[in-house]
Image (cartoon, helix red, strand yellow):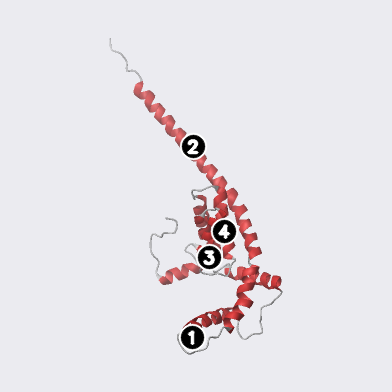
Amino acid sequence: MVFKRREKLKPLEWLAQVFWPRGGWSRAVRYLRHRLHRLPDTPHKIARGVFAGVFVVFTPLFGLHFLLAFLLAKLMRGNVIAALLATFVGNPLTYVPIGVISMTSGHFILGTEFDHHHDRSFVGKFFDAADDLWSNFFALFTDRDANWDGLIRFFHEVFLPYAVGGIIPGIMAGLAAYYLILPMVAAYQHRRRGKLKAKLEELRRKKAAQKKSAVKPSPTHE
């Protein structure tokens, strides 16, 4: 299986590897590239799957990137496994620049701006939105009044600009990944077919040689 580990990680080990994989990020990138190369599908389908996975990383729907990549890959008739692997482009090292680019673009397109003068920071507005959802859920079963101020502020200042602004950078990054992966996978599969063909020809030659030696007439004794 593609995602199965030989040894299960402990919670702290898993958390540590989220931020710094074993062997470093360069090794992780090489591993993903190796997996993409060996997928049993056409280069175009694999590249379309990679496009889908990279594109959804630019959406603010954290926690749903796997599902979105799966659905988009299906819609584009791309390779689903390639799409899921490509979502790892979104990681602790890339989410910050992706978020900054997406939100900056979104506010520019919408003609709005992030309220830096509010007493809550960017991360604080995430917590405010989560707190509103949690508190208002319990308000359904109590006499407390629901308060949506934090969630509304989060939607207008963070979520909506992120969603709108991530479309163009997501498409650009997806296309870049598509045209990068396509020739790499095609070249790898071409080399692999050549090696397999050479091995088959070698096996045929050996088999033919064995047949010749088997039917070679034995010398007659007078």
Question: At which x and y percent is residue 84?
Answer: 51, 59
Q: Amino acid at mark 3?
A: His
Distance Cα–Cα, label 3 vs label 1: 30 Å
Identify the residue at horizontal 49%, vertical 40% (top origin): 195
Secondary structure at badge 2 equals helix
Query: Quick one: quadrant of the N terminus?
Result: bottom left
**On residue 67, which mark appears?**
none
Q: Amino acid at mark 1?
A: Ala
**On residue 65, which mark appears?**
3
**On residue 52, which mark appears?**
4
Question: At which x and y percent is residue 162?
Answer: 62, 71
Q: Amino acid at mark 4?
A: Ala
Distance Cα–Cα, label 1 vs label 2: 68 Å
**On residue 197, which mark appears?**
2
Distance Cα–Cα, label 3 vs label 2: 39 Å
Q: Amino acid at mark 2?
A: Lys
